[in-house]
């Protein structure tokens, strides 16, 4: 019988734990988000972050910049926030307009305030197996597995998708936890062959229903990171109805990995505050 992993419930548990830690420091912890342009999906993600901050008593600051903004103006905004002691964490909401170099922008955020875990210094620490600030979605996936008592050590994990936000950092996290990890992508020769060997299968490519039942090993743990809109409904990268007949654990979309990403962001903001204040 498959167990559907309830990311909403687990994230609520995490919020309760964070709230207990935040209470003595309420009013002193701050998250700033820089939002460039008016992409509706980005605006939704930012609202979710603001809601989570309000729930926990974290101060929230939104810096809105027009689509036509220059790279120098974005860097200037980041510099101001880097030097603002009331701000514990900074996020530059991605994607940025094509005329702005994402790498240059993310590396200008102070590593200690980089709650998205995208600064080269933080990514380097992760690569060395000494994670500091870790991207929120991979962190959320690990936390889901941990709270469901799913052992990672020695397991064969297949990740479909090699993005800088999910696939690559997750690869290094799992490696540091003694998993045997394979990454698949659009140039992988035989995707079905790879996925059907996985004890734990993580899919993060943005292709609705890509993973079918016959591509999954019986009893596998299936983590679906995809969020796609099809006929006005949110669906994942996994054919949920088919795959749940064969998996031992599966995350739904919505309500699986999504809520965990925001919860882990709040966790990173608290962590950044604690590190800066030697707590």
Image (cartoon, rainbow, N blue to C red):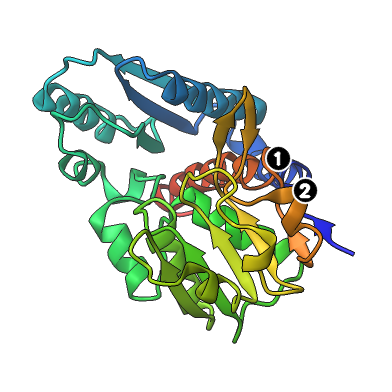
The residue indicated by pointer 1 is 255
**214 w.r.t. 27: above or below:** below
**For residue 207, side relative to residue 215 (left or right):** left
Q: Is residue 195 above or below residue 236?
A: below
Kind of element beneath mark 1 = loop
Residue 191 in percent (x, y) is at 48, 68
Quadrant housing residue 9: top right
Q: Which residue is mark 2?
A: 6
Residue depicted at 48% across the width and 42% down the height = 269
Q: Nearer the viewer, residue 165 or 218?
A: 218
The quadrant in which the N terminus is found is: bottom right
Gap in Å between the C-alphas at discs 1 and 2? 7 Å
- Occupied quadrant, residue 167: bottom left
Tell whether 52 sits left or right of 194: right
Q: Earlier in the sequence, mark 1 or mark 2?
A: 2
Is there any visible trace of residue 273 in the rendered image? yes
**In front of the other: 113 or 193:** 193
> Looking at the picture, how far across and down is residue 199, in whole percent?
65, 76
Disc ID at residue 5: none
- For the point 51% across and 57% down, which residue is it? 138
């Amino acid at each position: 019988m498959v167990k559907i992993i309830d990311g909403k419930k687990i994230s609520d548990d995490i919020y309760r734990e964070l709230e207990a830690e935040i209470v003595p420091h309420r009013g002193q912890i701050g998250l700033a988000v820089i939002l460039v342009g008016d992409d509706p999906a980005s605006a939704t993600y930012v609202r979710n972050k603001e809601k989570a901050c309000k729930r926990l008593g974290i101060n929230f600051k939104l810096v809105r910049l027009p689509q036509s903004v220059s790279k120098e103006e974005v860097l200037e905004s980041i510099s101001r926030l880097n030097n603002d002691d009331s701000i514990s964490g900074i996020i530059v909401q991605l994607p940025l307009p094509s005329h702005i170099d994402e790498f240059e922008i993310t590396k200008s955020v102070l590593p200690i305030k980089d709650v998205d875990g995208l600064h080269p210094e933080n990514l380097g620490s992760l690569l060395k197996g000494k994670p500091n600030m870790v991207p929120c979605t991979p962190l959320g996936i690990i936390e889901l597995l941990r709270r469901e008592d799913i052992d990672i050590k020695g397991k064969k994990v297949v990740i479909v998708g090699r993005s800088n936000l999910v696939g690559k950092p997750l690869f290094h996290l799992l490696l540091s936890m003694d998993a045997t990890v394979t990454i698949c992508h659009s140039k992988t020769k035989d995707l079905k062959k790879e996925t059907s060997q996985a004890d734990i299968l993580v899919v993060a490519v943005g292709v609705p229903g890509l993973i079918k039942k016959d591509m999954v090993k019986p009893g596998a743990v299936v983590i679906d990171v995809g969020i796609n809109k099809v006929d006005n409904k949110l669906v994942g990268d996994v054919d949920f109805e088919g795959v749940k007949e064969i998996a031992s654990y599966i995350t739904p979309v919505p309500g699986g990995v999504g809520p965990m990403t925001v919860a882990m962001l709040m966790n990173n903001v608290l962590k950044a505050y604690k590190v800066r204040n030697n707590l």
